[in-house]
Amino acid sequence: MDAGNLWILVMNATRARILRGLPGALSLAGTSGLPGGAAGQAELVVRARQPYLREVLSGAAMAPAAVVPRGHASAVDWRRPLDADESLFCRQVSMMLESHRLAGDFDQLAVFAVPDILEQLHQAMPAGLRDRVMAEIAKNLVALSEVDLSWRIAASLGLA
């Protein structure tokens, strides 16, 4: 597989790592993986702000739709704000990637995420960005070190 100008998105519900090429020793053609082999930051990290869950936890927005009637096991439906935060985060990451795509920063995108995040990302991505996705792999690799991440990505994409 030709990995030309490849960017890699490694994401879970609260954190996204965007690798501009394969990091470290696995960088293709001896470059840093950046467009034209330019030096600079090889990884962007984005963290979810989780505004909906923060509102619920702070008690500032106890909307009636989020409250469960008395006698039930839980007083708050925690899934609703979590889902809203995940959806918002997927849209934010997609829009950031779309701006880089429009700038011509990458030709291909590989996505590593758990299945529910992959589904939300796919829905959030504009058509032009979806067309650049060369692989979607259902794995949560966010917590791996740079070296371990490099090897796992290369092996998963058949570049090792």
Image (cartoon, helix red, strand yellow):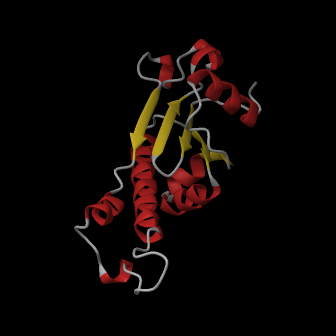
Q: Quadrant of residue 60?
A: bottom left
Residue drawn where x is 39% and y is 45% of the image = 99
Residue 153: x and y in percent read 67, 32
Along the viewing direction, whichever of 127 and 143 lies nearer the viewer: 143
Q: Quadrant of residue 117?
A: bottom right
Q: Quadrant of the N terminus?
A: top right
Along the viewing direction, whichever of 42 and 55 lies nearer the viewer: 55
Residue 5: x and y in percent read 57, 30
**Name of the residue lying farthest toward the left:** 60
Lateral position of residue 48 relative to residue 147, left or right: left
**Name of the residue lying farthest toward the front:** 71
Q: Quadrant of the C terminus?
A: top right
Residue 38: x and y in percent read 45, 17
Residue 131, compared with residue 145, is above or below; it is below
Residue 3, compared with residue 62, is above or below; it is above
Lateral position of residue 124 relative to residue 23, left or right: left
Residue 90: x and y in percent read 46, 55
Along the viewing direction, whichever of 119 and 105 lies nearer the viewer: 119
Residue drawn where x is 40% and y is 74% of the image = 76
Residue 112, compared with residue 160, is above or below; it is below
Question: How many marks are shown on the rendered structure?
Answer: 0
Residue drawn where x is 74% and y is 28% of the image = 159
